[in-house]
Image (tube, helix red, strand yellow):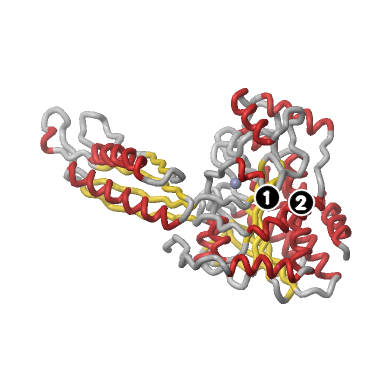
Amino acid sequence: MTKQNLFRTTDELAPLCSSMCKKLWENPECGGYEKESADYLRGILRDEGFIIVNEEKLKHAFYAEYGSGKPVIAILGEYDALPGLSQKVVAHKEPAAKGKAGQACGHNLLGSGSATAAIALKRYLEEEEVSGTIRFYGCPEEELLSGKVKMAYFHMFHGCDLAISWHPMCATVVYDEGYLANASVKFHFKGKTSHAAFAPERGRSALDAVELMNVASNYLREHIIDKARIHYTTDSGGLPPNVVPDHASSWYFARAPYMSQVRDILRRLELNARGAAMMTETEVTVEKGIGCYEMRCNHAFADLTHKNMEEVGALEYTEEEKEFAGKLQETVDEATLSSEQKLYGEREEALASGIYPRDFWKQATLNGSSDSGDISQIMPMNMFTTPCWPIGCAPHTWQAAASTGSSIGAKGALHAAKIIVGIVYDLLNDPEATEKIMQEFRQLEDNGYQPMFEE
Ligand SMILES: [Zn+2]
């Protein structure tokens, strides 16, 4: 089968791809609760002839394998939704089910597009006598930045050589500029209650400790690297003001280009917490959360992805899709829209149909994090995006949830499937290209990767 025929085979799977996109969109399940979504994809891949491998301790994670021999290629899929972002496929904010979850990050497309690619590649492997194994990975809890960290901890990626992932966004762009490492930690302060007016001297306020810790952490910002991020919330200290609060907690995220930097910021936050506890004569306990590593870029892999994007070519949209995208774009505020249009170099069309330059992300920075970073520590990995909503719309918004339920989203998923099959075709048939990627990975410094998760 030629590559062109493989692209055609993938195109023929468009009805299956759209029905998967729709099914996952109609039943949005949040991180940790993706039972039906995972079972649905397991069922489709099992019926297609894949062998399903589950992990007892992580119910909604699995991989579906087909083929034999090396290389073993992991195609990552996700399916979790976001709480409170339910939305109908309309160009104004209107929940499909009030207060419920919605696919506002397009993970319904991410799961479906990757599964479509795996099925197309299975058809290819059936026909050709090539060595190679395809694994579709059903990865839960991406929005919690924990699923792939736990999967790595449970050795679910053991035996894989290379990994490919993608994400819905507003344009066809390859990523090799990295994501930040991120870790989460909670500080629980314990004090003593007392009447706040009658006997304040007998009370020790846990809320004072949280506030003092936050003040210290805001001063800390000046003395950490520019690229680091610290954010915090508190969900406690909520007794009536005439009672000195004896319990209060603060929840912190720290992000930085490398996990080693994140660990150092966590250490300094802990010092702030201990200092605040000392000042207020309260006690503090530290609850370490899950952390995900930075993305280790592989430029040879990104080159191969970009080459395949160009081979797949630009997308075409119907008049209806353009009109719907235009209406969604009109709901974005003027300042955001014009800066996004400037970045994507597009004024006339709401949908970015073309292929963006290889070095696109050099002109902008990515300050988010993803648990895919952990995969890039284990093996060479590349990620890319396809347009699944209009330029100016952001992930985690009602506009994105509306678009990911429409044919625009399904088109973005199939486009991603075609790019993935093209990349895998090259990995299977061009040992030199594969070796170049493997070699770049081998040359990376060993950073002692350990999944930041404890059972
Ligand atoms: Zn996402």
Q: As displayed, is residue 50 above or below residue 321? A: below
- As displayed, is residue 363 above or below residue 293? above
- Nearest the viewer among 279 and 116 is 279
Which residue is denoted by mark 2 in the rendering? 309
Residue 200: horizontal and vertical position, in percent? Answer: 13, 33
Secondary structure under badge 2?
A: helix
**Residue 3: image tag:** none
Identify which amino acid the numbered label 2 is placed on: Met
Residue 341 horizontal side relative to residue 271, left or right: right
Q: Residue at x 61, y 40 (%)?
A: 104
**Earlier residue among tags 2 and 1:** 1
Type of the residue with mark 1: Val
Q: Nearer the viewer, residue 126 or 32?
A: 126
Q: Position of residue 181 (x, y in %)?
A: 48, 53
Quadrant of the rendering where the N terminus is positioned:
bottom right
Image side of residue 221 versus residue 50, left or right: left
Q: Is residue 69 above or below residue 58?
A: below
Asked whether disc 2 touches disc 1, contact meaning CB atoms under 8 Å apart, the reply is yes
Q: Can residue 39 be seen in the rendering of this structure?
A: no
Position of residue 120 measured from the top left corner of the image (x, y, whole percent): 80, 60
Q: Which residue is mark 1?
A: 174
Secondary structure, mark 1, is strand
Asked which quadrant contains residue 106, the reply is top right
Q: Residues within 10 Å of mark 1 (few under 14, many from 20)?
A: many
Whole-number angstrom distance, CA of label 2 to CA of label 1: 9 Å
Q: Locate residue 343: give its quadrant.
A: top right
Q: Position of residue 202 (x, y in %)?
A: 11, 38
Asked if ligand 1 lies within 8 A of label 2, the reply is no
Label count reads 2
Q: Residue at x 72, y 70 (%)?
A: 133
